[in-house]
Amino acid sequence: MILAAILLPRLLASGAEPPADAVKLNPPRVQYRINEASATLSPWIDSNGWRIIRTPGKSFFYQVTADAAALAAAEAFTYGADALISTDASGSKAVESMLDFLRKIPEIDQAPVADIGVVDDGSDAVGEIMNLLSRMNLLYGIDKKLRVNIRLGAEAQNPSVLAHKVRSQLGDENRSLRIYGSEVVIARFTADSRQARIYLLNYSNRAVRGLRVRVKGTYAKGDLRVFGIGDASPADWSNESGATEFTVPELGAFAVIDLSR
């Protein structure tokens, strides 16, 4: 396999300014908002993956503090972003810890897996649809013709309705990847003919336990690396109906699972 060089985020020197053309990203986090249907708190994830996917080749920068800086580094790594991180002293330590973890992840050359094609007209409405698809862990590619395709039309006024409609059209049984047991974890899935990789980003500040993952395809084993946890391994591994399922016993801010056939 040809290996692609790992692109790691970098700390911005104290007092330095990011490049003028760098795109500023939001601090990655979870905000809890009232769910109008049930009057309960629902998590809203501030993630940047869709923005990075939408503008390949751009430079990005984060302005974050404390542990959010480590999550920013993991997010940039997950989406292959050329990113700078401006942070405080505690954030710098968190980033360095994450970078030590990222350097130990094997290099790969795999394409992102997508189930949904999005025709990007550059509008805010399409951006919001991509944001919602990411939060729902619906895998999409821009300007690709796939099983289900989105071209913005009359539904532009309600991206949320369109995102749920697309999920229904695709059918959960046809999704290449599904996550069970958390509303605060966003996944990315890449693969080639022999191997696959799953990236898991936990946008809350609490560990997620018992996260169940399902991917299409039969894989014989998985190597699990969890930030902050040594000797992690997937549990309850099973192969059934052309799919592979397993459990991540505990997930902190970030994890990578390499699957082999």
Image: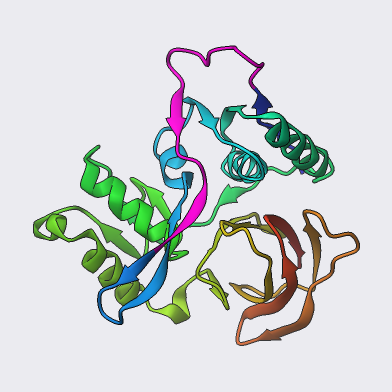
Relative horizontal placement of residue 27, taking residue 14 as reference (left or right): left
In the image, what residue occupies the spot 23% across and 65% down?
162
At 47% across and 49% down in the image, what residue appears? 47
Identify which residue is drawn at 65% across, 40% down.
66
Q: Which quadrant of the rendered structure holds the N terminus? A: top right
**Where is residue 138 shown, x and y percent of the image?**
43, 64
Quarter containing the C terminus: bottom right
Answer above or below: position of 224 versus 128.
Answer: below
Residue 15 included in the magenta stretch of the image: yes
Region of the chain picked out in magenta, as a range: 12-32
Residue 145: tell me if it is visible. Answer: no
Q: On screen, 91 above or below 233?
A: above
Q: Residue furthest right?
A: 231
Q: Quadrant of residue 179?
A: bottom right
Q: How would you classify the magenta stretch by its main secondary structure? A: loop
156 to the left or right of 136:
left
Q: Is residue 239 above or below residue 183?
A: below
In the picture shown, does residue 173 fall above or below 57? below
Q: Residue 84 in the image: state x and y as whole percent.
A: 59, 25
Please state the horizontal and vertical placement of residue 36, each as a whole percent of the image: 25, 74
Q: Residue at x 27, y 43 (%)?
A: 120
Q: Is residue 152 magenta?
A: no
Residue 98 visible somewhere in the drawing: yes
- Looking at the picture, how far across and down is residue 19, in whole percent? 50, 13
Residue that lies at the very extreme toward the bottom in this rendered image: 240
Determine the image quadrant of residue 208: bottom right
Picture colour scheme: rainbow
Side (left or right) of 257 relative to 165? right
